[in-house]
Image (cartoon, rainbow, N blue to C red):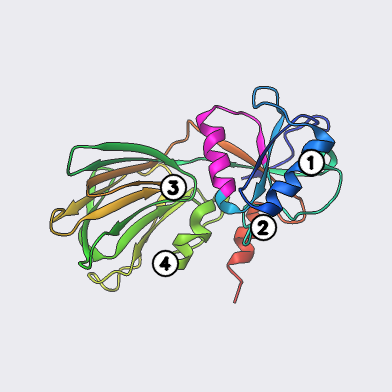
Amino acid sequence: MTVLSPFKQKPHRFAFRAAHTPTAHAECEKLITRYGNHSLEDAEAIICLGGDGTMLETLHDALVQGFRGPVYGINCGSVGFLMNPNKQIDLPERLNRALAASLHPLRMKATSLHNETCEALALNDVYLFRQTRQAAKIRIHIDHRVRLKELVCDGILLATPAGSTAYNLSAHGPIVPLSGNLLPLTPICPFRPRRWRGALLPSNAHVAFSVLECEKRPVAAVADSVELRDITCVEVYEDRSLSVTMLFDPEQTLSDRIVSEQFRA
């Protein structure tokens, strides 16, 4: 959901984060020279320079470290769906005009054949995928009820609304508006049932995946950049106790971008 800027007056204390590229590093140095570089404890906002991957890493760090301020991205990468244009204008004024979007992460808990467990947060998606030439066989539980006994596929993913335009869209899943309170569940190359194209779930749904024939047909699970291989089961739900705030120029908010993506050729 998009809301007005969280600032009562122009912010002036920023913590800068940059991708490991010459362009992002150079732009970051210019801004630090002009505005200084503050610690997270003292900063009013995080300024992220790079692409969408760097933004996701920055948002994860903000969640883990309990940073309560917003994150503003400046595109120094390629796609930059989560970023703002790299324009040389007054940064405090730009942030003061920006609109905020609050995102809740998915929380994944995965268990492997070796009794390893992995908990991770995902702001884009959680997905399962086959590790070998053989298709995966996955059972899907929604709110502790079996909804699909056996999905034969390359994989399956559960996306956030913000992540619905990423891997989910490439897998022919639906784009979901931020205000929709929905999570798209999308199969990746389904073989059986061949005509099943996924589902739209309420944001409070508890989703569990059981891997069938897990030794013969090994499967990995990924939450954004965290991966666990040889899994037996995965639980996923939206963690409403956590949130991170992103800032976007009023000319094109995140909600606008998600709508616009549905009309691209």
Q: Nearer the viewer, residue 226 or 192?
A: 226
Q: Which residues are magenta?
A: 54-71
Earlier-in-chain disc, 2 versus 1: 1
Secondary element at tag 2: helix
Earlier-in-chain disc, 3 versus 2: 3
Residue 186, quarter of the rendered image: bottom left
Earlier-in-chain disc, 3 versus 4: 4
Label 2: few (<14), some (14–19) or many (≥20) C-alpha neighbours in 10 Å: some
- To which residue does mark 3 refer? 225
Does residue 184 appear left or right of residue 77 in this picture? left
Task: Give the label, 2 or 4, closer to the camera.
Answer: 4
Q: How many marks?
A: 4
Earlier-in-chain disc, 1 versus 4: 1
Up the image or down, 81 lies above or below 105; here it is below
Task: Give the label, 3 or 4, closer to the camera.
Answer: 3
Q: Tell me whether circle 3 and circle 2 mark residues in contact (CB < 8 Å).
A: no
Q: Is residue 66 magenta?
A: yes
- To which residue does mark 4 refer? 171
The residues bearing labels 1 and 4 have C-alpha atoms spaced at a distance of 38 Å
Measuring 63% from the left and 54% from the top, which residue is drawn there? 255
Measuring 29% from the left and 69% from the top, which residue is drawn there? 190
- To which residue does mark 2 refer? 256
Location of residue 223 in the rendering, given as x and y in whole percent from the top left corner:
40, 47
The residues bearing labels 2 and 4 have C-alpha atoms spaced at a distance of 22 Å
* Disc 4 residue type (three-letter): Ala
Task: Give the label, 2 or 1, closer to the camera.
Answer: 1
Label 4: few (<14), some (14–19) or many (≥20) C-alpha neighbours in 10 Å: some
Secondary element at tag 4: loop
- Taking the view exactly as shown, the residue that stands out farthest to the bottom is 265
* Disc 1 residue type (three-letter): Leu
